[in-house]
Image (cartoon, helix red, strand yellow):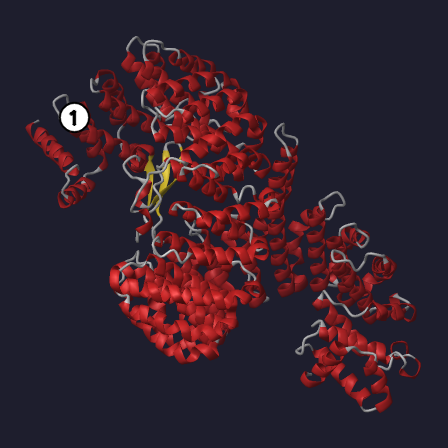
Amino acid sequence: MAEQQQQQQQFYLLLGNLMSPDNNVRKQSEEAYDTIVGQTKITFLLQAIRDVSAAEEVKQMAAVLLRRLLSSSFEEIYPGLTLEMQTVIKTELLTSIQTETSPNIRKKVCDIAAELTRNLIDDDGNNQWPEVLKFLFDSVNSDSVNLRESALHIFWNFPGIFGNQQQHYMEVIKRMLVQCMQDQDNPHIRTLAARAASAFVLSNEGNTALLKHFSDLLPGILQAVNESCYQSDDSVLKSLVEIADTAPKYLRPNLEATLQLCLKLCADSNLTNMQRQLALEVIVTLSETAAAMLRKHTAIVAQSVPQMLAMMVDLEDDDEWSMADELEDDDFDSNAVAGESALDRIACGLGGKIILPMIKQHIMTMLQNPDWKYRHAGLMALSAIGEGCHQQMEAILQEIVSFVLIFCSDPHPRVRYAACNAIGQMATDFAPTFQKKFHDKVISALLQTMEDQSNPRVQAHAAAALINFTEDCPKSLLIPYLDSLVQHLHVIMVAKLQELIQKGTKLVLEQVVTSIASVADTAEEKFVPYYDLFMPSLKHIVENAVQKELRLLRGKTIECISLIGLAVGKEKFMPDASAVMQLLLKTQTDFNDLEDDDPQISYMISAWARMCKILGKEFQQYLPVVMGPLMKTASIKPEVALLDTQDMESISEDDGWEFVNLGDQQSFGIKTAGLEEKATACQMLVCYAKELKEGFVEYTEQVVKLMVPLLKFYFHDGVRVAAAESMPLLLECARVRGPEYLTQMWHFMCDALIKSIGTEPDSDVLSEIMHSFAKCIELMGDGCLNNEHFEELGGILKGKLEEHFKNQELRHTKRQDEDYDEQVEESLQDEDENDVYILTKVSDILHSVFSSYKEKVLPWFEQLLQLIVQLICPSRPWADRQWGLCIFDDVVEHCSPASFKYAEVFLQPMLQSLCDTSPEVRQAAAYGVGVMAQYGGELYRPFCTEAIPLMVRVIQSADSRVKENVNATENCISAVGKVMRFRPECVNVNEILPHWLNWLPLLEDKEEAVHTFDFLCDLIESNNPIVLGPDNANLPKVFLIIADGVANESVKTEDACSKRMADVIRQVQGSGGLWTQCVSTLNETQQKAIQELLNTA
């Protein structure tokens, strides 16, 4: 006994040390704690919790550790305990809740009980601790407030506690919550009951019937929100935000009351900023999760807009503001930032049709207010709503811009700053319309504002707005201003360099360097005359700005030099290239000393890639120096943690952590530092592989080993996209090592690529992965997939097609919803486009499989056949029919004559589609007829005959050459040509050929144009009398067709037919009179084209 007591005392000492402020003591204690076996830990921890004499913080620590143990290691420890020990734990916990006098410890023990129950619900939903349910019922009906509170706390922590008995106990649960929410004597019981009710609703968010049944609890929850806020407790309000986010439909029956309450709280300046912002958050969240429902309550939304604007006016007067040289991060708790963000989100959520009319007059009034804070807020509000009110603001952009520009010369510097902010934002939101319409006014206003020497903050922001403006400015618009822009930027750069040397201020210089880069990037070769004006100073900055506080300036200057180099091209940059490379290399060698968060890293990495584009193959020599740090950055592993809600309170988002709520009191945390750098580094590896091809072969192995696992890097989309893009490029790099090495590399990536097509959650990333996979198969060819691969791929593609149909049905259901309106329709159409894009990628993959494997693959394809047939049903949307036909086109092109066994399912739809109302469908059908003629074989002959008059009708219809129809028409012309060329027995060639010549040349579809020119050369070379005409009378017409084709770049020099056409022309050249006759009918452009063809082919 004495020994056990001694052990227990040692354990208490250990618990105390775990809380020690001294890092070393704490670390040693954690190591010691980790060595104790699970069962002993549980025994000691339980004893500590139940020990009346132990200090409160020791008991508290023991309770936290026991809960964590059950949360993280339940499976490893609990099932191995004896039945007796398991019973002891359960009994001890329930006894402790009943006898513990400290409210804090009692709460913590309730958390342990909830955690244990969570783990004791089996796969069938049976709660294997029935005593805890009895305890809940007894406690909630008990006279003891403490017990009622404990029952509610357990239920709040784990609302799924009833498992598969929930339906059975539904009325009891509801009665229990209602009774506690009406407890007149105990406000905190009412609060806790409201939180428990909210948690229950949230955990049943998908159960519509249950939400309806519990809707009469909402008034009680709202009452508790109101009461608790004035008791400085915002926990129920936070629950309401969660409901708005996850189960917004629950609020529908009492939406008006919910919105009214939130408005009232938001407007009450007696509450804390945090509470007012949370109340606003409910309304803003609903605009994102239930926009259509909220749009029916526009009166309240209109009342919330002035609240957001009032928050934006909540600014401090700060005399130092305009001289600050470090840009501090926005204070995210401030009302001004919260108001602006809310406005941005509600405009995006509800759309400009609703928000702009509500806000326009308010902004105009604010801009005329003598108090600078109102003018500032009005301009910032204008910046915030640009994205959401895009369409509506575009209509009155002239009026808005003229108004904003006035404020570039406002007497108050912070208003001038806000005006620059609005211009910069509009330059991005409304590009390139904004640049095209307002270039003269905007450029001169920004250049003038940039001269504001006494307010560096304003100067810097004007430079930032200029960057936004030039990034999206069409080159031709910028060129006339180039001289004036460059002179201004040069003067400011020189002045600010002096300031840096004298006073150490750098803010404006940082922005100006980027403005110069942006101008060069847009002006491209037109920047050459100004190169020598800037390059010496820029190199000087990189050489000398080595202090820690100048890291950002140095990084931006490195970026600027590389962008100028790329803009002016190799010839102009070459004399400086090696000096710049030496500067970069020096930074690179000091690279290992750079701290992980050094801003220079990502600038350096991007600069290297630009240097690679400039130098091409000559860059290879630098790879040994560059690749080490690049691989190190690309290999960054982020810090991640699985936390439960209690632990989260100790980690704040300010330390760079972001959280994803996984439900069930669990959250996933990730430290985001380094993620952007990692993504940039991966993008650059892609760039090297693309630019250097076989010059990169030395590194393919280490890069492929890095990239394949990154297909599953779910913390950053850009990393997964880069990983996918790299795969086919790395295979191309590795080709020079021979087939064996190539096959090994392909085997390394193939499984992972197929699996990620099945598991990728983001549709943009998915389309990239599918696209890369298709390219890899085309590269590797026949035999690159084994049976397991095929089986898995078949299952995944089948799943994608089934999901495509299911999503269409879901959208159909949403169109029947009571909240359906035109804005909902817009978002449904976006979803639809996303879906179709994935369908195009399914088609890409099938194309690559068919073109590599030919008819061998047809038995595998049959599992998908019915789904593809479903795509081409006449009742499906046009995009489905288009892509379904494309897939059958591939089957005919690559798997004939075996393809004919499917003729009965696709031939009639294909022929009918030749006259479809949708040009995309006509195009796919016409292409199909062309490949039938060229590759299909004998069995397709009758169908070629049947198709000709249908295609002629399309070609001859009045609007066949208008923009939207031209591609379909040209595919018909090409297909008619293919039938005459490969299946002349199916058609009266003499009758059709004169018409066909009149339809040439094809100007839009370059691929099909080559087929038509090939056939034309066949006909000329065989002296076809119809083509040449009596006494070669048609030759001028043939010249005209060839000249237009070349002038339009429908044929390229490398196409075989261009040499054949040049030979035809040379033949004519030899026969004087005919040549003159042919050339005289051509205009200048056409004559030039003929000359060019003769020179190059």
Quadrant in which the N terminus is drawn = top left
Q: Which image quarter: residue 272?
A: top left
Residue 642, position in %: x, y?
34, 41
Residue 567, position in %: x, y?
48, 70
Residue found at x 42% / y 69%: 562
Q: Which image quarter: residue 1042?
A: bottom right
Can the viewer see residue 210 in this picture? no
Can the viewer see residue 1028 in this picture? yes
Quadrant in which the C terminus is drawn = bottom right
- Residue, far left: 2
Residue found at x 54% / y 48%: 401
Q: Is residue 958 above or below residue 1087?
A: above
279, 364: nearer the viewer: 364
Q: Is residue 229 above or below residue 882?
A: above
1019, 613: nearer the viewer: 613
Residue 1025, position in %: x, y?
90, 79
558, 44: nearer the viewer: 558
Identify which amino acid the numbered label 1 is placed on: Glu
Residue 642 horizontal side relative to residue 778, left or right:
left
Q: Which residue is mark 1?
A: 56
75, 186: nearer the viewer: 186
